[in-house]
Image (spheres, rainbow, N blue to C red):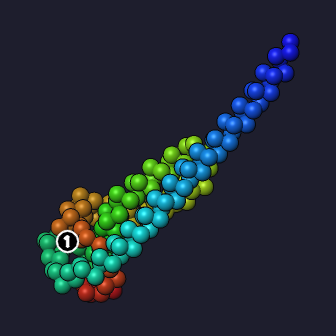
């Protein structure tokens, strides 16, 4: 019987140590997530600086593109801009997403996940317009002409679409 209070005390101490270790682990996962987010932001800045190297004088003269009306051409360029920007930082986006999921799964803190999802939802209207134009043709065109980061507004002006 003397050991019962001792066992209860040890059990309470053990739970306290486990709870403290859980907080340390959650803090570590949060730190990793925040670090990966900083790396992602840094890469996005680098991708923005790459835009100046894009050849804005390159003719966008495929038969498919020429047949599009001005609104559809603007849509293709806007989609190409978003796609090229995302591809430029793909590795960092994946690392951030993985660390975010680890943190949320462990901590239950869904706030960063909800913020990330709202960013990833993007412009659904733009996606629907691309679907109407033809996603396969658009992707083929982008792979040939708009695969590296560029300034969408500048390209729209050069193409006489703005």
* Position of the N terminus by quadrant: top right
Which residue appears at 60% of the width and 55% of the height?
Answer: 111
Give the x, y percent position of residue 29: 54, 49
- Which residue is under mark 1? 145
Residue in the foreground of this view, choosing between 123 and 96: 96
Give the x, y percent position of residue 40: 42, 64
Residue in the foreground of this view, choosing between 148 and 61: 148
Which residue appears at 48% of the width and 51% of the height?
Answer: 99
In the shown orientation, is residue 132 left or right of residue 18? left
Residue in the foreground of this view, choosing between 89 and 27: 27
Residue 3 visible in this rendered orientation of the protein: yes
Give the x, y percent position of residue 18: 67, 36
Q: Residues within 10 Å of mark 1 (few under 14, many from 20)?
A: some
1 is higher (above) or lower (below) than 51: above
Residue 122 visible in this rendered orientation of the protein: no
In the shown orientation, is residue 49 left or right of residue 114? left
């Amino acid at each position: 019987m003397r050991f019962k209070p001792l066992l209860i005390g040890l059990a309470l101490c053990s739970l306290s140590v486990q709870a403290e270790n859980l907080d340390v682990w959650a803090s570590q996962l949060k730190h990793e997530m925040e670090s990966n987010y900083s790396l992602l932001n840094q890469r996005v800045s680098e991708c923005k600086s790459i835009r100046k190297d894009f050849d804005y004088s390159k003719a966008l003269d495929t038969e498919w593109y020429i047949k599009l009306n001005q609104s559809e051409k603007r849509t293709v360029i806007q989609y190409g801009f978003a796609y090229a920007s995302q591809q430029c930082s793909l590795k960092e986006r994946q690392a951030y997403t993985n660390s975010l999921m680890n943190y949320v799964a462990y901590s239950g803190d869904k706030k960063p996940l909800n913020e990330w999802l709202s960013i990833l939802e993007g412009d659904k209207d733009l996606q629907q317009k691309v679907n109407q134009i033809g996603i396969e043709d658009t992707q083929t065109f982008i792979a040939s002409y708009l695969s590296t980061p560029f300034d969408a507004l500048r390209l729209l002006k050069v193409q006489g679409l703005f």
